[in-house]
Amino acid sequence: MSRKSLPRETARALAPVVIPLVTRVVLPIVIESLRRRKFDPEKFLEDAREGLEKGLKKTRPQLDEVKEEVVERAGKLYGEARKQGEELLESLAARGAELAQGLAQSVGRPRRRRRFRLVYVFAIAAVAGVGVLLASRR
């Protein structure tokens, strides 16, 4: 059987979880078992629970402070993003207006088409009709 190694990305993703687990759980168990030659899992779990409760009590006020700071920073980031978005929209609108104006100027006013108008047909027909009428009377 060939043994496959962990991909580099997987190892990097697991490192923040595995390293504290090894240093805070596995190493104390090994040290305790080597020291006493007998390991009491109930005692170890009780000690670990107490340590976690103490750590949680210490970090809770820090979490509240961090939460306020995060809310403040998020507000600033939102304001900055909104400002930059407005500037982007303004620049896009100005550029679009320039392009539209350039297109309108290039298209310009349509040229007047020269065509034979219907009025001339009626005038020629009237002159011809008058001529035929005059010629037929004589």
Image: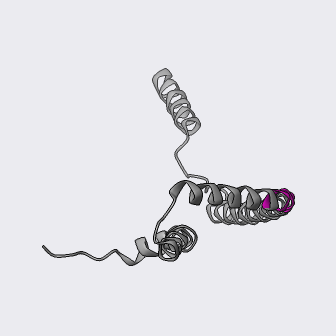
Q: Nearer the viewer, residue 10 or 118?
A: 10
On screen, residue 3 above or below 86: below
Q: Is residue 67 magenta?
A: yes
x and y percentages locating residue 78 in the rendered image:
80, 58
Give the residue drawn at x 70%, y 61%: 51
Which residue is at the front of the view, 77 or 132? 77
Is residue 90 positioned above or below 136 on the image? below
Residue found farthest to the left? 1
Location of residue 66 (image quadrant): bottom right
Q: Position of residue 90 (x, y in %)?
A: 78, 62
Question: Percent x, y for residue 41?
Answer: 51, 57
Check the image and report above or below for 132 versus 88: above
State the predominant SS element of the stretch in magenta: helix
For residue 46, side relative to residue 54 (left or right):
left
Q: Is residue 138 magenta?
A: no
Name the residue rendered at 50%, 33% in the picture.
128
Left or right: residue 57 compared with residue 11: right
In this view, which residue lies farthest toward the top? 137
- Point out residue 32 in the picture as x, y percentages from the top left corner: 53, 72
Q: Quadrant of the N terminus?
A: bottom left
Q: Which residues are magenta?
A: 59-69
**How many marks do you count on the picture?**
0
Tell me where residue 5 sits by quadrant. bottom left
